[in-house]
Amino acid sequence: MRKQHCVSEEGEAFVIFEDCDGVYRCPVCGSPELDRPPYDVNGQASFDMCSCGFEFGYDDSNLACKDASDGIVANWLRWRVKVIEKNKRSRIELSRLEKNLRAIGVKLAFDLIPVRDDENT
Ligand SMILES: [Zn+2]
């Protein structure tokens, strides 16, 4: 796993994870399915969409999307809660999601609240 450090024009810093095989992980759900980084080092979004439904550059922009809040990472969190909500009734889906999230340094607390997993970041 490689980390790409990004800083947006607004000065927001975040990390994008790349698997060893050159596949990028969705920063929202952790799914290893993006063939290019969702954001470049300057925080410019790819405008690709992950299977979790998040579109980089749209769902993280309060100029584009009315539901978006300020900040890229805040919108990842907003969307991640929805993804967890959607998957929590299926044990298989939930454990797959949990595994993907762990890979990007997020673990689910007992009440399914996503928290940063500092041991793995
Ligand atoms: Zn995703």
Image (cartoon, rainbow, N blue to C red):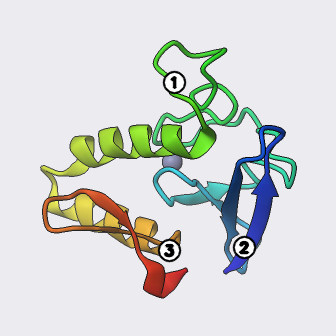
Query: Is tag 3's residue or tag 2's residue first in the polypeptide sequence?
Result: 2
- Kindly identify which residue carries mark 1: 68
Determine the residue positioned at 57% across, 16% down.
65
**Mark closer to the observer (1, 2):** 1
Q: Is the residue marked by circle 3 packed among few (<14), some (14-19), or many (20+) residues within 10 Å?
A: many
Are discs 3 and 1 less than 8 Å apart at CB? no
In the rendered structure, which amino acid carries the disc numbered 1? Ala
Residue 121 position, x and y percent, is 55, 80
Question: Quadrant location of residue 99?
Answer: bottom left
Q: Position of residue 29 (x, y in %)?
A: 46, 53
Q: Is mark 3 within 8 Å of ligand 1?
A: no
Mark on residue 3?
A: 2
The image quadrant of residue 5 is bottom right
Residue at the spot 65% in from the left edge and 15% down from the top edge: 64
Q: Residue at x 60, y 20 (%)?
A: 62
The quarter of the displayed image where residue 21 is located: bottom right
Q: Amino acid at mark 2?
A: Lys
Spatial CA distance of label 1 from label 2 is: 25 Å
Compared across the picture, whether 111 is left or right of 70 comes to left
For badge 3, the amino acid type reads Ala
Question: Left or right: 59 with respect to 95?
Answer: right
Q: Which residue is mark 3?
A: 103
Q: Does dot 2 land on a helix, a strand or a loop?
A: strand
Q: In front here: 116 or 10?
A: 10
- Secondary element under disc 1, as helix, strand or loop, is loop
Distance in Å between CA atoms under marks 3 and 1: 25 Å
